[in-house]
């Protein structure tokens, strides 16, 4: 595929997104931006969340990972499913009952000012780093296959991508994203299915034959029983469960979409439907990864990083049609993680730190100008972070993403667990220190784990350790009394 053709596909897809944006952002106001005026159909949200939760990281990293980790990631996906059940039955009822726009408002009611700011602050750090990493993955592919051919610097590529995100999220916010996510999920899933088709055709073997070869090989191994291994199946399962609870249930971006649905029962339907479909989709991505490995072995293809396997085969070996399918899928997976992150960060900072919802004396025009300034500011931060990730691109992006989650979402897990399951009052001004010290301890535990714990290596379960340390710290600096808001 020529760089010009790749760029043309990108432009055409972007224009389609802008068309959807134009329709959905008409007569948009603050409530449209924050919670979509609470009129989002639950089935539309459920379908669109597939693309938003998987993103470009899953699209490239999960298939590329199969050669090294087999199907062990499926145990994480099973954990995801039960994590979504917890969100539907425990967290969503809480958020709806308290009528929250930012979910971190719960922490203010339950603990106080400093706990509230700590929770919102850790979300902002988590989402900035995670979204930047996801965007980097896609932008880097465009750089390698398009912009390098024209000697255009990486920073120009980043600037173009972020500018497009700003344009189509600035006004409509979550109301626009609900519908663009639906479009993007459709194209992403089609890309995976068609990629499987193109690979089996090139290999000259029917799909059922390749599936038979897969399930008769070590590549289909899901369960790792070596306890010292970072991907032991129990670690994978519970890590997946708590990654979901934190990265979805305690994440403003993902919950903002649920809160745009009018009724709690419909939001729960959304979560149960989405969690079931997600299992099937993750399995499909793993099958695609196995087929990519079969093709790479047949053609003696080697790549420097596992994340490069899918784009290399799709764009250089399978022909123009497969290349077009891959690019549309990649772009479809990239935009949801970027637009949702920018919108949720703007929402959280505007409400949790600037208190725009509470400033009834301020006119709407001024609130809009402030929100626009916040929106642009976070876009600049994304720009800087992506350039930084360019300098440290040394391992699978999904591995980096979960490592970041382990450090940044752990304090949120500890805060919410303590609030929901104890009847104790914390000494609020100690909370920021506890939330900072817990990840620092986790870093040293992880770094020296093999020495300290007789060869044991931490995997994604570091998130649980971080959450436990935060919980323990809150318990130490707390006293009996004050019934939790969740039970009031």
Image (tube, helix red, strand yellow):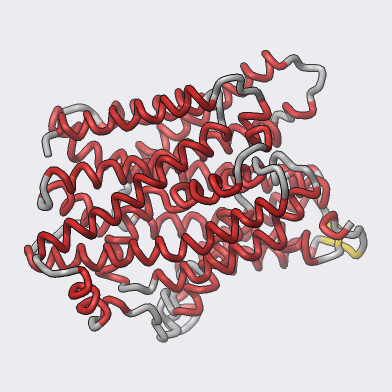
Q: In the picture shown, does residue 46 fall above or below 457? A: above
Looking at the figure, which quarter contains the C terminus? Answer: bottom right
Front-most of residues 426 and 327: 327
Instruction: Identify the image quadrant of the N terminus.
Output: top left
Can you give x and y, in whole percent of width and height, for residue 333 in the image?
A: 38, 45
Percent across and percent down for residue 417 are: 72, 63
What residue do we see at 18% from left, 45% from top? 323
Above/below status of 69 relative to 413: below
Q: Is residue 159 shown to the viewer in this render?
A: no
Q: Residue at x 29, y 61 (%)?
A: 63
- Using the image, determine if residue 319 lies above or below residue 234: above
Residue extending farthest to the right is: 481
* Coordinates of residue 262 in the picture (x, y in percent): 70, 42
Residue at position x 51%, y 56% in the image: 405
What residue is at 27 percent from the left and 76 percent from the top? Answer: 219
209 vs 458, left or right, is left
Q: Position of residue 294 (x, y in %)?
A: 16, 68
Instruction: Check the image and report above or below for 218 versus 8.
Output: below
Which is more toward the observer, 295 or 459?
295
Q: Does any portion of residue 186 appear in the rendered image?
A: yes
């Amino acid at each position: 595929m020529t760089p010009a053709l790749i760029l043309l596909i990108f432009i055409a897809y972007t224009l389609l997104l802008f068309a959807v944006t134009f329709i959905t952002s008409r007569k948009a106001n603050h409530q449209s931006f924050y919670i979509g005026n609470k009129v989002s159909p639950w089935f539309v949200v459920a379908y669109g969340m597939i693309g938003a939760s998987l993103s470009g990281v899953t699209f490239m990293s999960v298939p590329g990972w199969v050669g090294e980790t087999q199907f062990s990631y499926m145990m994480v996906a099973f954990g995801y499913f039960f994590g979504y059940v917890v969100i539907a039955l425990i967290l969503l009822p809480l958020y709806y009952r308290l009528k929250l726009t930012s979910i971190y408002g719960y922490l203010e009611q339950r603990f106080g000012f400093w706990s509230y700011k700590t929770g919102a602050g850790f979300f902002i750090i988590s989402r900035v780093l995670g979204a930047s990493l996801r965007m980097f993955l896609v932008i880097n592919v465009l750089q390698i296959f398009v912009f390098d051919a024209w000697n255009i610097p990486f920073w120009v590529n980043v600037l173009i991508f972020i500018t497009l995100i700003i344009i189509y999220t600035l006004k409509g916010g979550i109301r626009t994203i609900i519908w663009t996510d639906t479009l993007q999920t459709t194209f992403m899933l089609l890309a995976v299915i068609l990629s499987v088709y193109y690979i089996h055709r090139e290999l000259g073997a029917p799909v059922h034959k390749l599936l038979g070869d897969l399930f008769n090989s070590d590549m289909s191994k899901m369960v790792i029983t070596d306890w010292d291994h970072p991907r032991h199946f129990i670690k994978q399962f519970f890590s997946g469960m708590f990654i979901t609870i934190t990265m979805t249930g305690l994440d403003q971006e993902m919950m903002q979409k649920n809160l745009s649905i009018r009724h709690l029962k419909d939001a729960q339907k959304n979560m149960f439907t989405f969690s079931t479909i997600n299992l099937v989709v993750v399995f499909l991505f793993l099958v695609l990864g196995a087929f990519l490995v079969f093709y790479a072995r047949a053609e003696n293809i080697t790549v420097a990083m596992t994340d490069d396997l899918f784009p290399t085969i799709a764009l250089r070996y399978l022909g123009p049609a497969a290349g077009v399918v891959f690019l549309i899928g990649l772009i479809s997976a990239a935009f949801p993680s970027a637009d949702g992150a920018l919108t949720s960060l703007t929402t959280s900072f505007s409400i949790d730190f600037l208190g725009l919802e509470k400033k009834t004396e301020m006119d709407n025009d001024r609130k809009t100008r402030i929100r626009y300034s916040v929106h642009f500011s976070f876009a600049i931060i994304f720009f800087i972070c992506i350039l930084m990730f360019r300098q440290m691109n040394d391992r699978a992006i999904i591995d980096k993403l979960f490592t970041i989650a382990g450090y940044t979402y752990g304090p949120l897990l500890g805060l919410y667990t303590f609030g929901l399951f104890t009847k104790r009052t914390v000494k609020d001004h100690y909370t920021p220190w506890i939330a900072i010290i817990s990840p620092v301890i986790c870093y040293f535990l992880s770094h020296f784990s093999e020495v300290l714990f007789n060869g044991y290596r931490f995997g994604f379960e570091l998130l649980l350790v971080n959450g436990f340390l935060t919980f323990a710290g809150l318990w130490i600096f707390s006293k009996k009394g004050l019934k939790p808001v969740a039970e009031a």
